[in-house]
Amino acid sequence: MTMECRCEERGDDAISGPMSTVDAAIPILDLGPYLAGVPGADLRLAAELRRACETVGFYFITDHGVPQTDTMIECLPTCQAPRNPPKFPPQTYGEFYAWFIARNYAHQQDAAK
């Protein structure tokens, strides 16, 4: 499939020639080695990021450390004792994040109204 780019409205040749759709897969960048401090991982990740931006224009990131919204958060067993129960019930990360945003950014939402 080919699309023709026409720039008559702008009156320039900023984009010339046909643009073809990309058949390549979306690049997946793994941050795990970089975050773990593996030697050379920063240079490899930078090269992969540059290649993804120059060839495809977007990418997926894995092993970034941000939990899924359905990940359960609860008090560690070592923090609990018969006379020291957890202060908060177990909840998902999504529930925690919604509470955190509402608590810390409510003033911005009120100002926008």
Image (cartoon, helix red, strand yellow):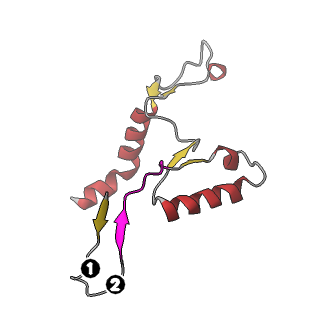
Q: Nearer the viewer, residue 44 or 109?
A: 44
Q: Residue 42 in the image: x percent, y percent? A: 69, 57
**Residue depicted at 71% across the width and 45% down the height:** 36
Quadrant housing residue 81: top right
Q: Earlier in the sequence, mark 2 or mark 1?
A: 1
Q: Nearer the viewer, residue 100 or 71?
A: 71
Secondary element at image label 2: loop
Q: Nearer the viewer, residue 20 or 43?
A: 20
- Left or right: where 33 falls relative to 84: right
Q: Residue 60 in the image: x percent, y percent? A: 49, 48
Quadrant housing residue 97: top left
Q: Is residue 6 above or below residue 29?
A: below
The kind of residue tagged 1 is Cys
- Left or right: where 102 falls relative to 23: left
**Residue picked out by circle 2:** 13
**Residue depicted at 32% across the width and 57% down the height:** 108
Tell which residue pokes out farthest to the right in this image: 39
Quarter of the image where the N terminus is located: bottom left
Confirm or deny contact between disc 2 and disc 1 (CB under 8 A): yes
- Left or right: where 113 falls relative to 70: left
The kind of residue tagged 2 is Asp
Q: Is residue 19 magenta?
A: yes
Secondary element at image label 1: loop
Q: Which residues are magenta?
A: 17-26
**Residue picked out by circle 1:** 7
Q: Main secondary structure of the magenta part?
A: loop
Residues at marks 2 and 1, CA–CA distance in whole angstroms: 7 Å
